[in-house]
Image (cartoon, grey):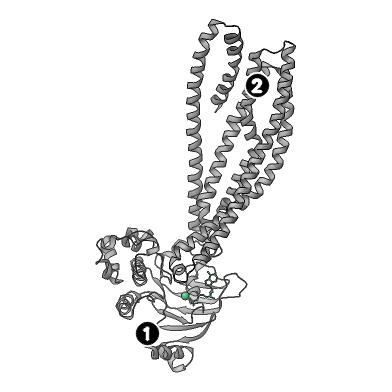
């Protein structure tokens, strides 16, 4: 960059001998070396230009890469609550739009700070050499321009801040119709969705237009002011020339040096806006990086967990105004026993089991594992000891085998994998596929049926082989026949494990050591199947209802 600045300045400096000696005085010597000097200068300029672009590109791409990796790592370790509170679109656009914006701003600022500043100095030197008096006139113009640009820069930041949000909205709406295209088709949501996109897109367009107008307005005003300046300089130059203080070559060289400054000066005075754009983009990136990670202050690490679980006066709310979701829940499960949780949908069953792997922190009360508060365990140790089949099965866009042996489970051998796949009846359908377990499941497992996905999730939990097993409506998408098959595998699995099972079909909870019935976040009944039936309360009613359905 420094070389580029010097080369540009020497180019305009050489205009003086070209004009005065080669053209006006017709000096043969000068006429010979000048073209060679110009060739050398252009070669050097090419090399310097290439080096500048290449290294700037390197800086920019490095910024993008490291920001992206950092934000991604952060996404991995943020608490579940963080994601509940936000929509996906803006989070995704951080990874693309914001990151690019920061990198662009960084490279621009580096260019301005080095090449442009040096170019201005070098050109200024040439001007001083050619005509100190004219230089003074030019210097007077700078404060005026700088002041104007400052005012414009402030307006600029306001708009660029707002633009990011509306880009997020565009991604959000688009993502929703991509994911929900069945619903859109079924319920004729075409016009509604088009309107919705139209609205956010229009907002985005308007704001971008504002941005463009403000930016080009800044340029236009600056240049106009510069135009007045140029006129003044030309007037002064002709006076100097009349008095014999300025040759034609000196004037051309001076004037070219001044023009050479024009672009760099414009960018320097605009540096604030460029910087602000980056700052606006970085703001939301760093606010994510500054979010607190999951709390992981526990120190207990146990390899021989028996699996004794106790909920002690646990209350919990999601932190909204709608009050607690769980109210004073106390229940304990001995190691190796099975606790079934039943209740209407929305009664808090999934919430209750999600507290055990600490997806959320209890608001009051405590949960104990082998007599030790789960908060005292290292988070990774706690989760290593829990297998979970959640209500919404999440599969990644990878093969069935890699979805079974996800993450830490990768270390299992192919034989172990196949055994788990058989127990979970994944093999039933996988063996029919041309690539077997190595078949890709598509985006979120879209190429599998709901029941098939559930079987993969069950297989994954089987493979993990942890002392505690949580099954949250793990077989809800299966027909009764497949369910019965899997139930055999699950029963085998539950034998020596503490199991928390939420089941929509009561036939699957009959054998539990204890059943609790939740209603609006409270335990309203507790006991064995036989006891609860005899009591003739909620459970008995639920049971009778299902029985008559069947
Ligand atoms: N992530 C969440 N953020 C806020 N509220 C939630 C969240 N998940 C569930 N809820 C609310 O908590 C209550 C219990 O939900 P849940 O535990 O899923 O019930 P169940 O599994 O028994 O059907 C519901 O009223 C639901 O609206
Ligand atoms: Mg649920």
The spot of residue 59 in percent (x, y) is 50, 38
Residue at mark 1? 507
**Would you say the beta carbon of the disc 1 residue lies within 8 angstroms of ligand 2?**
no
Image quarter hosting the C terminus? bottom left
In the rendered image, the vertical position of residue 41 relative to residue 221, given as above or below: above
Residue at mark 2? 255
- Quick one: label 2, few (<14), some, or many (20+) residues within 10 Å? many
For image coordinates 37% across by 76% down, the residue present is: 475
Horizontal relation, residue 498 to residue 314: left or right: left
453 and 270: which is toward the camera: 270
For image coordinates 61% across by 48% down, the residue present is: 209
The spot of residue 153 in percent (x, y) is 67, 42
Tell whether label 1 touches label 2 (CB within 8 Å). no
Residue 156 visible (yes or no): yes
Residue 82 visible (yes or no): no
In the rendered image, the vertical position of residue 487 relative to residue 157, given as above or below: below
* Image-quadrant location for residue 134: top right
The spot of residue 112 in percent (x, y) is 60, 34
N-terminal label among 2 and 1 = 2
| Residue at the far front in the pictured view | 191
Secondary structure of the residue carrying tag 2 is helix
For image coordinates 68% across by 19% down, the residue present is: 128
């Amino acid at each position: 960059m420094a070389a580029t600045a010097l080369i540009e300045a020497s180019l305009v400096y050489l205009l003086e001998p070209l004009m005065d000696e080669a053209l006006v005085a017709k000096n043969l010597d000068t006429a010979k070396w000048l073209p060679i000097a110009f060739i050398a200068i252009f070669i050097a300029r090419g090399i310097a230009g290439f080096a500048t672009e290449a290294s700037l590109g390197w800086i920019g791409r490095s910024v993008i890469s490291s920001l992206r990796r950092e934000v991604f790592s952060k996404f991995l370790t943020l608490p579940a609550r963080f994601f509940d509170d936000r929509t996906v679109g803006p989070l995704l656009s951080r990874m693309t739009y914001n990151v690019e914006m920061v990198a662009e701003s960084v490279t621009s600022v580096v260019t301005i700070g080095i090449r442009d500043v040096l170019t201005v100095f070098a050109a200024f030197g040439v001007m001083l050499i050619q005509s100190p008096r004219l230089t003074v006139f030019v210097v007077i113009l700078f404060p005026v321009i700088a002041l104007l640009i400052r005012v414009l820069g402030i307006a600029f930041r306001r708009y660029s801040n707002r633009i990011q949000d509306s880009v997020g909205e565009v991604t959000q709406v688009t993502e929703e119709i991509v994911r929900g295209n069945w619903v859109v088709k079924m319920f004729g949501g075409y016009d509604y969705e088009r309107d919705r996109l139209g609205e956010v897109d229009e907002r985005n367009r308007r704001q971008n237009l504002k941005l463009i107008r403000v930016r080009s307005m800044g340029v236009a005003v600056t240049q106009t002011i510069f135009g007045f300046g140029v006129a003044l300089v030309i007037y002064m130059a002709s006076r100097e020339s009349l008095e014999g203080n300025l040759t034609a070559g000196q004037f051309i060289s001076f004037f070219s040096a001044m023009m050479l400054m024009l672009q760099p000066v414009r960018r320097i005075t605009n540096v604030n806006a460029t910087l602000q754009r980056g700052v606006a983009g970085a703001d939301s990136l760093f606010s994510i990086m500054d979010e607190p990670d999951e709390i992981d202050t526990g120190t207990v690490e146990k390899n021989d967990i028996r699996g004794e679980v106790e909920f002690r006066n646990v209350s919990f709310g999601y932190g909204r105004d709608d009050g607690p979701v769980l109210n004073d829940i106390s229940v304990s499960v001995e190691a190796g026993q099975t606790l079934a949780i039943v209740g209407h949908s929305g009664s808090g069953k999934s919430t209750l089991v999600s507290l055990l792997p600490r997806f959320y922190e209890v608001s009051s009360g405590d949960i104990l594992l082998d007599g030790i508060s789960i908060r005292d365990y290292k988070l990774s140790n706690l989760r290593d000891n829990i297998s979970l089949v959640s209500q919404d099965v999440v599969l990644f866009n990878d093969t069935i085998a890699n979805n079974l042996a996800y993450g830490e489970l990768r270390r299992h051998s192919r034989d172990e994998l196949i055994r788990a796949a058989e127990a979970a009846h994944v093999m039933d359908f996988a063996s029919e596929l041309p690539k077997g377990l190595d078949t890709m499941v598509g985006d979120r497992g879209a190429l599998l049926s709901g029941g098939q996905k559930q079987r993969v999730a069950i297989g994954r939990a089987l493979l993990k082989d942890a002392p505690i097993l949580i099954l949250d409506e793990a077989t809800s998408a299966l027909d009764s026949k497949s369910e019965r098959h899997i139930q055999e595998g699950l029963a085998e699995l539950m034998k020596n494990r503490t199991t928390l099972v939420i089941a929509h079909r009561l036939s699957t909870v009959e054998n539990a050591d204890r059943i609790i019935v939740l209603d609006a976040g409270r335990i309203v009944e507790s006991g064995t199947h036989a006891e609860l039936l005899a009591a003739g309360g909620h459970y008995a009613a639920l049971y009778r209802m299902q029985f008559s359905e069947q």
